[in-house]
Amino acid sequence: MPINLAILTIKKAHEGMLSGAFSAVDLATAYLEEIKKKDGDINAFREVFADVIEQAKKADEKFAKKEGVNPLLGIPFSIKDNILIQGRKAGASSKILEGYVAPYDATVIARLKEKGVVFIGRVNMDEFAMGGSTENSAYGPTKNPHDLGNVAGGSSGGSAASVAADFSLASLGSDTGGSIRQPAAFCEVVGLKPTYGSVSRHGLMAMGSSLDVIGPLTKTVEDAEIIFDAIKGEDKYDSTSFSPVKEISTISPKKIGIPKGLLDMGGIDPEVKANFKEMVLKLEKNGYQISEVDLPHLSYSLAAYYIIMPAEVSSNMSRFDGVKYGIKKEGGNLLEDYLNTRGEGLGKEVRRRIMLGTYVLSSGYYDAYYAKANRVRNVIREDFSKAFTLVDAILTPTAPSHSFKIGEKTSDPLAMYLEDIFTVTANLAGIPAISVPSNIQIMAPHHREDILFAIGKDIEKLR
Ligand code: GLN
């Protein structure tokens, strides 16, 4: 009997394999067939791995021997092209890394390998995760599986599209300012940005190191929870990683805050507003207490993010010098080597951010821009701490618009940056946030992913 991928979840796939209704090889084969049929149009994958069936066979052997059986055994994953899998290519969808092979496993990959997942392939993204539409990939945009004329969102557009199109049951993406949540919203899947430091960044190509976090994109909130549990926790290779010490209370979260003035803000699509209001009403009818919360410095988030992030980008990108990694384009001297290598190897948006970042860090401007943005970051963090003494969670749309047309915003970087208006705050504050269909974002205090899962599951039911 063919497997109905459209309604599959991790739990159902696990039950199917456990009961023998289908094997891990059957499951992997079903996904590979979908990729063959549809990815020519969608362009989610940078590479489909050649050994998928062998990986699935190993999972089947474990099921047969009842060895290491767990909910993720044999579950097919796609992985964003900026997360390292030992011995496989990793390119961050950039030309500068052409031919680069990962020398070690990212910690998240090592943890998934222990669970026996099946890696289907690596997926497309905005170059070095800089963008919100996957149009900054050096290998063409990823199309939205629900509307091929539209973008899949970004930067983890390949991850979101691969789950939405049934090319894999789950995916790992990275989120620096919304790159898991916004494509999840655009492709109608679930995307979790965990608390900063709760998932190791070891083996993730760095973008903005004080903002970056790895997280899952899935069909359901429950699936995101299963994966988060498998990848989280302290790691000796990432000094910012940690396991929360406190046991979490089990009282169910009922108080939801909506940022004051949110719905009067300009630039939000009327449909997005209407959809958001409708969900708030439904939650209220179902026992949630909704109130307005004051986040007085919220409107400065985007400006602060677009200073702090490029500053960190400019320093992280200095390692791509044509010597240590990827392509090298010779010039007459060292400076020309750099100019040629980066000029040819890096796309426009990446170069723009390196320049912006270098500028805000330069001696005459450091205090005016970088230091000030960090002070703003601190007050935003305090705003959230205060708000979370009054409410369990804060609700906003994930993105101010639905998925837009391919090419619509490519000539206007500022319009593209405005896409991030609701997502960057969680990265600045370090708090966890989840996007659930349709286009609803929930934010919670540090280490309270449990709150996101509880409310997220209610929203899934109320849709
Ligand atoms: N769209 C945002 C940006 O371009 C977020 C990117 C990300 O989270 N990696 O910076």
Image (cartoon, rainbow, N blue to C red):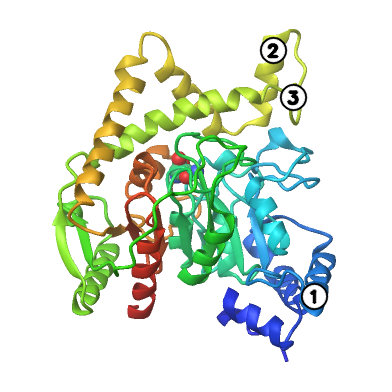
Which amino acid is tagged 1?
Answer: Asp
Image coordinates of residue 286 in percent, x first then y, are 23, 79
Which amino acid is tagged 2?
Answer: Glu
SS state under label 2: helix
Viewer-nearest of discs 1 and 2: 1
The residue closer to the viewer here, 443 or 80, is 443
Answer left or right for 71 relative to 90: left
Answer left or right for 384 relative to 430: left
Q: Find out whether the residues at labels 1 and 2 contact each other: C-beta distance under 8 Å.
A: no
Mark identifier at residue 278: none
Res. 352 in view = no
Image coordinates of residue 340 in percent, x first then y, are 69, 20
Quadrant assignment, res 54? bottom right
The residue drawn where x is 36% and y is 55% is 399
The residue closer to the viewer here, 263 or 444, is 444
Total numbered circles: 3
Density class for disc 2 (Cα within 10 Å; few <14, some 14-19, many ≥20) is some
The residue singled out by tag 2 in the image is 336
Cα gap from disc 3 to disc 2, whole angstroms = 16 Å
The residue singled out by tag 1 in the image is 60
Which amino acid is tagged 3?
Answer: Lys
